[in-house]
Image (cartoon, rainbow, N blue to C red):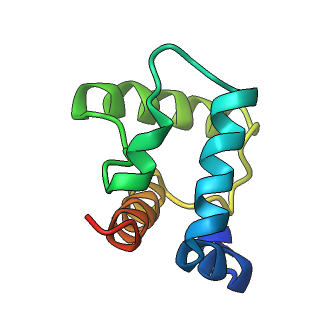
Amino acid sequence: MACLAHHNASRAALTDRVIFEDVVRHKTVFFNATYANYNHCLDGRLRLVPDEDQLVLLESDYEAMRTASIIRDEAPRFDALMERIRNVEVEVNRQSGA
């Protein structure tokens, strides 16, 4: 399964601080949420993977969607998907100078 994080455009965006800051600014203006601090993305504190207690609920939901055929059979296993997301989180935080 292809992963957007491995696409050349994603790699380029991660290394271009101006683009990165523009994305954060856009997100803050158009999708602002009281619980989110988008500026954390700029200083190495991006969190994509939820805490363990939330992961249990998320995995249950993911498996229910697989069972209902909302998510296709070739979709990655939940643990493999979370590992990919963790890798993106680490890479973004590394690139932001954390």
Residue found at x 63% / y 66%: 18
Q: Looking at this view, is 25 or 32 the one in front?
A: 25
Q: Where is residue 90 in the image (x, y as percent from the top left)?
A: 33, 65
Q: In this view, does 34 lie above or below 50?
A: above
Q: Residue furthest front?
A: 18
Residue 46 lies left or right of residue 10; in this view the side is: left
| Viewport quadrant of the C terminus | bottom left
Q: Is residue 4 above or below residue 62?
A: below
Residue found at x 43% / y 65%: 92
Q: Looking at this view, is 90 or 12 the one in front?
A: 12
Q: Position of residue 20 (x, y in %)?
A: 59, 61
Q: How many numbered marks have been drawn onto this rendered protein structure?
A: 0
Q: In this view, does 23 lie above or below 5?
A: above
Q: Looking at this view, is 19 or 31 the one in front?
A: 19
Image-quadrant location for residue 89 = bottom left
Q: Where is residue 52 in the image (x, y as percent from the top left)?
A: 23, 34
Residue found at x 50% / y 13%: 34
Q: Position of residue 51 (x, y in %)?
A: 26, 33
| Viewport quadrant of the N terminus | bottom right
Q: Residue furthest top?
A: 34
Residue found at x 34% / y 54%: 43
Task: Say whether residue 33 is visible.
Answer: yes
Q: Looking at this view, is 15 or 55 the one in front?
A: 15
Task: Say whether residue 48 is visible.
Answer: no
Q: Residue furthest bottom?
A: 8
Residue 3 lies left or right of residue 94; in this view the side is: right
